[in-house]
Image (tube, grey):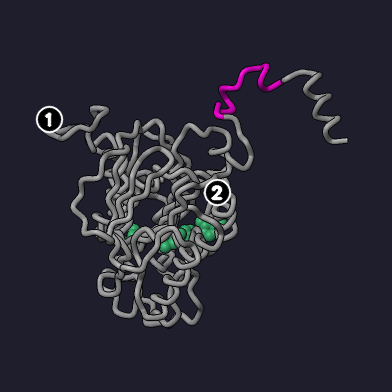
Amino acid sequence: MTFITKPSLKHKQLPTNALGLTRRDYEGSVSTLCAGCGHDSISAAIVRACFELDLPPHRIAKLSGIGCSSKTPTYFLGKSHGFNSVHGRMPSVATGASLANRDLIYLGVSGDGDSASIGLGQFAHAMRRGVDMVYIVENNGVYGLTKGQFSATSDRGATSKRGVVNNDEAIDLVALALQLGATFVGRSFSGDKDQLVPLIRAAISHRGAAFIDCISPCVAFNNHDGSTKSFDYVREHNEAVNSLDFIKTRKEITADYAPGTLQVLTQHDGSVLHLRKLAADYDVNDRVAALHHLQSRHAAGEILTGLLYVDPTPADLHTYHHTPRTPLNALNEPALCPGANALARLNSSLR
Ligand SMILES: Cc1ncc(C[n+]2csc(CCOP(=O)(O)OP(=O)(O)O)c2C)c(N)n1
Ligand code: SF4
Ligand SMILES: [Mg+2]
């Protein structure tokens, strides 16, 4: 994979976070994507979210498949762990890594081709199993890396740059994630940092499968009239259900929201989500209503964004499998080989 190292010069007045790190400490190599690609804005949002959360970079593992989107982990979090896997196979690598070491924060970055075509099965199983990870799809409606073929998230009736019409129905990964049991589901737009950064921060703090579909225009192949994933189209049809504030630890609520429009959600780690409801009747804890709202707004030609669903008491793969807190590589010999008596007890329990 090509990359250009960034000069390590840092301006002395760059703000630092609680760890004494600057935003530069969360960046990666210089991006080689097309100038203006939405994916670069998502990388910048990830950098900002991790900086603001004071995350030690070595506690993060970034994983990806193949595509322009899957190249992006090279361009952020240069001091974190990274695994650039095979096309569509990021979720199984993330599942294995998460099971082996639950001390890391897993950040999976994928594309609509990577997750909605070749990797659809893998995506589905990561969601239904509740793999504890943040799963971001950088959704541009095309296979950018292989020069702009329609992907499975491309809307029926959308046209390619050359005017070819897409006749196939689109797969909505948000609807799938909701249906498959993801415990945090959001959609955003690469051009809306005010929405995207808190959404990523909240997803990182969520324990369980957190899915974010981020519309990310491909300026080279899918930013023309006739595309439903272009900057202009998304700006004109974006319907946000809520605006999100994220507060890392439990704090008294002092924000001056109008009564009845604020929803406060506390996550397992004590972090607090403040949701200002833009759609008055929108309930972020109702999975079925979220699916209904999503589909009815889609039928009206709108792209619903914001935090669409969150389970306030989520369970994840570790909960279901009673995995040990200790990473597997740190288990000692007695834990790994509990002895003949333990084996006899296990065998008799199976008779
Ligand atoms: C097994 C396999 N099949 C096909 C390809 C060719 N290929 C590379 S990237 C890609 C699609 C990428 O699209 P997407 O995931 O949407 O990423 P984008 O480039 O749009 O960000 C394909 C089909 C491949 N690398 N490996
Ligand atoms: S081809 Fe499209 S997706 Fe790939 S870097 Fe260029 S603008 Fe981004
Ligand atoms: Mg794509």
Q: Is mark 1 within 8 Å of ligand 2?
A: no
**Residue 141 appears at what percent x and percent y?**
41, 68
Badge 1 element: loop
- The answer to which quarter of the image holds residue 232 is bottom left
Residue annotated with mark 2: 130
Identify the residue at horizontal 48%, vertical 47% (top origin): 313
User: Magenta stretch: residue 330 in it?
Assistant: yes
Count of numbered circles on the image: 2
Does residue 213 appear left or right of residue 93 in this picture? left
The mark lying in front, picked from 2 and 1, is 2
Identify the residue at horizontal 33%, vertical 44% (top origin): 272
Identify the residue at horizontal 34%, vertical 75% (top origin): 302
**Residue 122 appears at what percent x and percent y?**
58, 55
Q: Is residue 37 visible?
A: no
Count neighbours of disc 2 (C-alpha within 10 A) and say few if under 14, some if 14 to 19, many if 20 or more. many
Identify the residue at horizontal 35%, vertical 33% (top origin): 57
Q: Which residues are magenta?
A: 325-337
Quadrant (top left/top right/bottom left/bottom right) for the C terminus? top right
Residue annotated with mark 1: 12
Q: Amino acid at mark 1?
A: Lys
**Residue 90 appears at what percent x and percent y?**
52, 49
Which of marks 1 and 2 precedes in the sequence? 1
Q: CA distance from mark 2 to mark 1?
A: 42 Å
Quadrant (top left/top right/bottom left/bottom right) for the N terminus? top left
Does residue 247 appear left or right of residue 175 in this picture? left
**Residue 110 appears at what percent x and percent y?**
45, 54
